[in-house]
Image (cartoon, grey):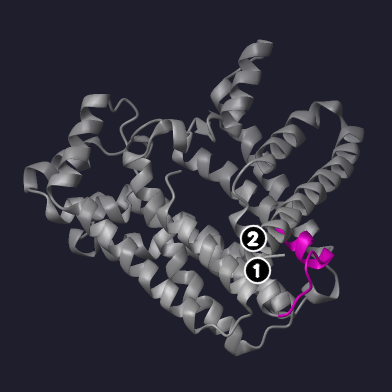
Amino acid sequence: MSLAEQLRVEQTDFVAAVAGKLTDFLTERTTVMSAISPDIDPLMGSISHLVTGGKRLRALMCYWGWRGAGGGAGAPEVVTAGSALELFQAAALIHDDIIDRSDTRRGGPSVHRRFSELHASQGWALDPERFGHAAAILTGDLCLSFSEESFTEIGERAASGSQARLIFNLMRAEVMAGQYLDILEEVAGPRRDRAGAVSRAQSIIRFKSAKYSTEHPLALGGALAGAPDGLLRGYSGFALPLGEAFQLRDDVLGVFGDPLATGKPAGDDLREGKRTVLIAFALDQASPAESSFIDAKLGSPDLDEDDVEEIRRIIVDCGALRATEVLIEEFGRVAFEALDELALDELPKTALRKLAEATVSRAA
């Protein structure tokens, strides 16, 4: 079997194993929750729906971190770790959509929107929006609890005090800190020094997204397989800049992406008021009048298509888009150079290279 075929088969088998693990895990928990009340079923259905899709980036990073550190192909420990990461990702997405006031996720209604629609369809009392938000918060919390429960199933390798447990705990805490910095910048950013906006935005993407998307999952897999500190440092040197490139690409797609590919309306990040690195560059490099226009329109729920197009024009004309693309290229270069220096077998190294290439150049 060729290297390419071996990689395809092993990766496909792992993704299928994670999907099966998630199905079995959630089926068992649905039985428990349904015994409390069948009214809980929509919460479980929302979680199951959300973990069914996605690219499995975090689970795959964990897997190849495991394999690169000498872990066996398809081992149950790394399959369980992958499912725990997918559950954590789902919890983060549910809460993120509430915070960002985003009504869509992967081309369909977000979880809080699904619950608002359920309220409206049943003709229930009081405010459907408030019910939707409250139900989604609880769904996200339940999903977060499930991620911890799943991770604990790994056993001794993930026990308290283990390297894997320390990474898993740090990952979750950093995401919450990054999320808070993000919402803080939305409200405080207009009153803060614009000269520091790019630096603040980069810090946000590092802790809100980059570390938990690539760095921590890769290190988690390595730690579960008993990777030495030197390899874990090498993993970080590759995966952190890759994660930053990943989030910067996401920010570009949030403004310029094709809705058919991204599953979100065009310019959705602008309506949500996200003060990304892309926006920070625009505020710094545009004319005072153009910067004031962005500040006035950013985060407006009634932002129309003409406003979106004008902000896009400003971003392009002032050089903010190009500056962000240069940053993506630079982070990608650093990541690939670090990958070249990693002493890994050919299969995990090739797999990580392909994941990195898809991450940096993706269109959705």
- Residue 185 versus residue 364 in the image, above or below: below
Real-space CA distance between mark 1 and mark 2, rounded to the nearest whole angstrom: 6 Å
Q: Position of residue 257 (x, y in %)?
A: 36, 39
Q: SS of the residue at dot 1?
A: helix
Quadrant of residue 109 within the rendered picture? top right
Q: Is residue 11 above or below residue 313?
A: below
Where's residue 41, x and y in %?
A: 79, 30
| 225 in relation to 96, above or below | below
Please tell me how crowded label 2 is: few (under 14), some (14-19), or many (20+) other residues with Cα within 10 Å: many
Q: Which residues are magenta?
A: 70-82
- Looking at this view, is 256 or 270 the one in front? 256
Residue 78 colored in magenta in the image:
yes
Picture residue at 46% right of the left edge, 60% below the top: 357
Horizontal and vertical percent position of residue 295: 21, 42
Residue situated furthest front in the rendering: 1
Between 241 and 146, the one nearer to me in the picture? 241
| Depth order, front residue of 138/276 | 276
**From the image, which quarter does the N terminus lie in?**
bottom right
The disc placed on residue 303 is none
Q: Is residue 213 visible?
A: yes
Residue visible at 45% across and 66% down in the picture: 242
Q: Which residue is mark 2?
A: 60
Is label 2 in a helix, a strand or a loop?
A: helix
- Disc 1 to disc 2: CB gap under 8 Å: yes
Q: Is residue 251 left or right of residue 352?
A: left
The residue tagged 1 is 64
Residue at 65 percent across and 67 percent down: it is 3
Judging depth in this view, the residue of 324 and 124 nearest the camera is 324
Which residue is at 44% across, 50% downward? 362
